[in-house]
Amino acid sequence: MEKPNTMEDSELRKQLTVLKEELEELQIEKNFVLGQTGLHVSSSKVAQQAREYEEDTIRLQGLIAEIEGKIKTKV
């Protein structure tokens, strides 16, 4: 991914759309995987997956906030 500082407004908006879609897909996957009740998985594995989902969520939210800030400053 190109740095938001060097991207044009249209590129920023496209990247913002992609990141929001990724975040939505991640949340759907997280709910599906962690919401499984019929699987027998160790609690440490579930906790590890939950941490990984949380880290990915925070990363995507940070990128979204950064790009939204860049769009606002260009307007």
Image (cartoon, rainbow, N blue to C red):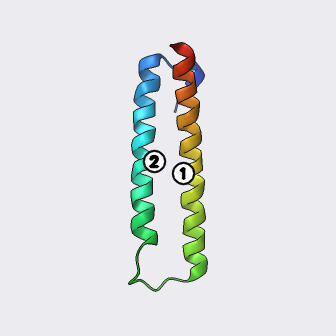
| Marks 1 and 2 in Cβ contact (< 8 Å) | yes
Q: Is residue 2 visible?
A: no
Q: Which quadrant of the figure has residue 67?
A: top right
Say which residue label 2 marks: 23
Residue 31: which disc? none
Identity of the residue drawn at 57% across and 76% down? 45
Identity of the residue drawn at 53% across and 20% down? 72
Q: Amino acid at mark 1?
A: Thr
Identity of the residue drawn at 45% across and 47% down? 23
Residue 57: which disc? 1
Q: Secondary structure at mark 2?
A: helix
Residue farthest top in this picture: 75
Return the disc, 1 or 2, that comes first in the chain's sequence.
2
Residue 40 vertical placement versus 6 (above, below) = below
Identity of the residue drawn at 39% across and 58% down? 28
Q: Residue 68, image x and y in percent?
A: 52, 28
